[in-house]
Amino acid sequence: MDDQHNDEQHTVSRRGFLGAGTLAGVAGITGFGSAIMSREAFAKAAKDAMANATVHPGELDEYYGFWSGGH
């Protein structure tokens, strides 16, 4: 019975494990987020990517598809 009691004291609860993981994730995001890419650089990269992905009316895109439901 003492062995079971000692094992229970050394286990990590699910809530404790998830809380530690969340805390580590938040610390990593806030600590490394500014080192990896600044807000301005991220906004510029997002704007450039959006401009490249835009297909204006009349332009061809390989993913356009037209289906008829037979109505």
Image (cartoon, rainbow, N blue to C red):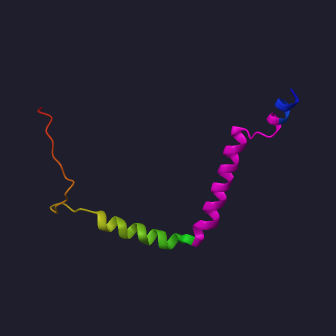
Residue visible at 85% across and 35% down in the picture: 6
> Considering depth in this image, is 1 or 52 the residue closer to the camera?
1
Is 8 magenta? The answer is yes
> Considering depth in this image, is 12 or 52 the residue closer to the camera?
12
Magenta stretch: dominant secondary structure: helix
Q: Is residue 24 above or below residue 51?
A: above
Q: Residue 53, image x and y in percent?
A: 30, 63
Q: Residue 2, image x and y in percent?
A: 88, 30
Residue visible at 15% across and 46% down in the picture: 66
Left or right of 60, for residue 32? right
Taking the view exactly as shown, the residue that stands out farthest to the top is 1
Left or right of 3, for residue 67? left
Q: Quadrant of residue 63?
A: bottom left
> Considering depth in this image, is 25 or 49 the residue closer to the camera?
25
Task: Please state the extent of the stretch shown in magenta in the rendering.
Answer: 7-35
Q: Quadrant of residue 57?
A: bottom left
Q: Quadrant of the N terminus?
A: top right
